[in-house]
Amino acid sequence: MFYMPIVTSSSSLINQNNITRYIRRMDQRQFGQRAMWYHSIAVVYVAFLFIILGSECQAATLSLKQIGGRFIARGELVHADRAVPAHMIIDLGTPIPLLIHENTSKVLKVDKGSPVALRFSEFTLSDISCTPAGIELLEEITRDYAEELEEIPVVAVVGLPAFAGHTVELNTRNLSLSLLSRPLDAILTDPELELNSAWKSGKSWVIPFESQSNGYWMTGHAGEDFELKIRFSTAVVDTLIDQVTADLAGAPGGDLDTLTLGDLEITDYIALRPEDLTAMLSTPCDVILGANLMDHFRITIDYDHNKMWFLETLEPNFPTAEQAFFVARYEENANGVEQFVTEHPHSRLAQEAAQILYRLRLAEFPLDPKTVIHAVRLYAATVKPGLRARRLIELADELYNNDSNDLADVGRMVLDMALDSAPDDVNALAEYQIRARLGRLAVMQKDFLQARRYLLSAVFGMPQDPFVNYWLGVLYEKTEKCNRAWSRYLQAAIAKDAPPEAAQALGRLNNDAVFREQFTMRDAEQLLEGRIPEYHPATRYDDDKSLVDEKPVRLIEMFTCVDQPMTQVAELAFSGLREYFTDQTVVLIGYHLPVPSPDPLVCPAALARGEFYQVTDTATILFDGNDAQSPAGDETMAEQVFGVLKRAALKSQPISETWQLSGGIDHRDGIITGQVKVQGPAATDGRLWVLVCEKIIMVSGGNGILLHRNVCRTSLTDPNGLTLPRDGSVLAFPIELDMENLNKIISDQIAGQEETQGVRFYTRPTYIDPAELVIVAIVQNPDNKADLSVLSLELNQE
């Protein structure tokens, strides 16, 4: 065959040596005199181009590797004067030109839509629009196949639109991708090309496809009247059929008699793998074409004219054993799966089949530890040594989700096998991870001495690992060393990949009255210094001489939610205001709302205050009932937002002194008593709120704030406030609060929210330390929301 490679570099066209080598390859394919004639013409043509353009050229055939089931090419990402060596996944089923890992985008200094050049040794693609994203798949392939990748990471995914304007030829058997200079119709109708004769041979099919924002789609049939939506992809190995579609076709195991793509009978070549495609794709899809089908064809894609040409290069050889495995997998037939693993230990599906066998054996009743261990050994034999320890660790982790006591010995055997493989594992931390799990197993078996040895050995190698710290916490709690347990739970809870159990354990200790007698939230605050997001202002209001004429507001109220990430900066700045002003100068209250999601610190009083102000979004901050601010962002904006809020709090404004608030409270034997006195001018409307607040409380959530300040927990008046007399008389509002009953009220509030919202909170902060309790009284105009007077009362302790 003869067709000229296209030009893709803006600075070069055709390289004479590359053309000569290309023609010589045609000589070797016995094209005889015609090839030599073309060779002469090409040399003259190249010389002519060199005279005119004075430039060099690159070959248009890209060499690929198949690693982890993906087609990968090595090259460089180039933007402006920056270049990053990289491996890139070539996914011709992706409709996005270029996805770049967000870390690499920072190195290149590119944003969404920035033009990036893809420089390969064979050719260059210029001005490709990029989209930065956090892509875990790239990290996993880089980690698991570091040796095959020669330590050069996979940092991008190249989609079909990156090759727009070119005809792409994919040959998966020789792992190459070529860019052709002519549209598909011109190639197929040129009588001088070998491709034309191949087209006429009847061993090829031209299939139209539809280009959409979510991929490239074709139409197929499973029988005359059963039309299927088929998506093209080069990112999966097996050709997948949706499980529901397979059921409707009468073959839930994927063993369909017929599935055609145009006139191409797919089931002659490959076994279909049933999967739940609704979980993989947001758009309904019946079939996803996989690389196993493409291994039988050379596929030419004319992107501009929406056509694909499938040219058969390997005759059908139906994989009967693979189909039998897919059927056994669907039927959960452990014996059938084991037969496949035993008879085909070197199959690309052997590792997956052995893992499925392991899970099926685990689910059997009664459970037979011998069959489980046999499945583990089969699985270990399918994994290459450099990954074996890590994979066995994953199997061991699955055991802990099974409540059977029979699995303790199985777990130990699996971990012992992993320990034997650890020296060969590419993961240098494998041995420590295994010892951590052996320690966990020892804790479960109440062998606390051995558990301590294993876990301390593990934490020596992985001091920040949340898993190890959590299980050390469990060990310390079970051996009644609660202070140490709390510290370990804390380290686990503030880690990047914190186990949810760590937050639950912290909450459990925080609600333990006996433990809290010796450990306060002030202790927690000191331990957390510098380890969580926080903001501390450089100055204080009382020390700022420039503010001698400024009168700050009396009340600052914040509406927030622990699971709204954008409230992080508001809570940090709010905490900064708390430090900047003293409680005697300005009173601060934090209300939690279930916006956008449930929050364990929500209470009826907070909801009522939100309704009073008609607050519908978090975070919202009000100053003396007005001047609403809605800061949003993360800790990097804390100083800027604090400055804005401080200026709002220091606005000069006339302050009414016509309403007077006074009072005091005492705490004895778990009972809080006292009163609040209110007096105002006659014929003036006012409403009183008496709120119970907690100065500092620990709850983890999506906004990354662990310690929340001045949180409203309940109301002693009606949540909507108490209407005050208009005759100018003094109202004495009595306060009597049983701390045990208060804890129950808060527990009921959290339980009620869990029931109505259908959630279960990891942390349920039901205990209030009397030392951290504050009673806040607010007198407010019910019409214009103006604050008339505010009073903050702290306890006189025994």
Image: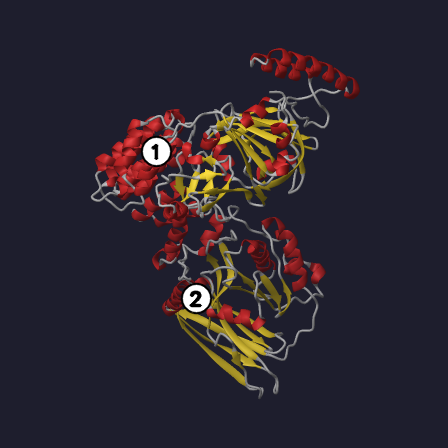
Q: What element carries label 2?
A: loop
Structural distance between the alpha carbons of marks 1 and 2: 57 Å
Q: Is residue 277 left or right of residue 250?
A: right
The local crowd at label 2, few if under 14, some if 14 to 19, many if 20 or more residues have their Cα within 10 Å, is: few
Q: Report the front residue among 691 and 191.
A: 191
User: The N terminus appears in which quarter of the rendering?
Assistant: top right
Instruction: In the rendered view, tell whether residue 755 sits above or below residue 221.
Output: below
The numbered mark at residue 392 is: 1
Q: Earlier in the sequence, mark 1 or mark 2?
A: 1
Residue that label 2 marks = 797
Q: Give the residue type at disc 2.
A: Gln
Q: Residue at x 57, y 43 (%)?
A: 210
Residue 364 seen from this side: yes
Q: Residue at x 59, y 54 (%)?
A: 569
Instruction: In the rendered view, tell whether residue 207 sits above or below residue 656.
Output: above
Q: What element carries label 1?
A: helix
Q: Position of residue 267 (x, y in %)?
A: 41, 35
The local crowd at label 1, few if under 14, some if 14 to 19, many if 20 or more residues have their Cα within 10 Å, is: many
Instruction: In the rendered view, tell whether residue 350 sits above or below residue 40.
Output: below
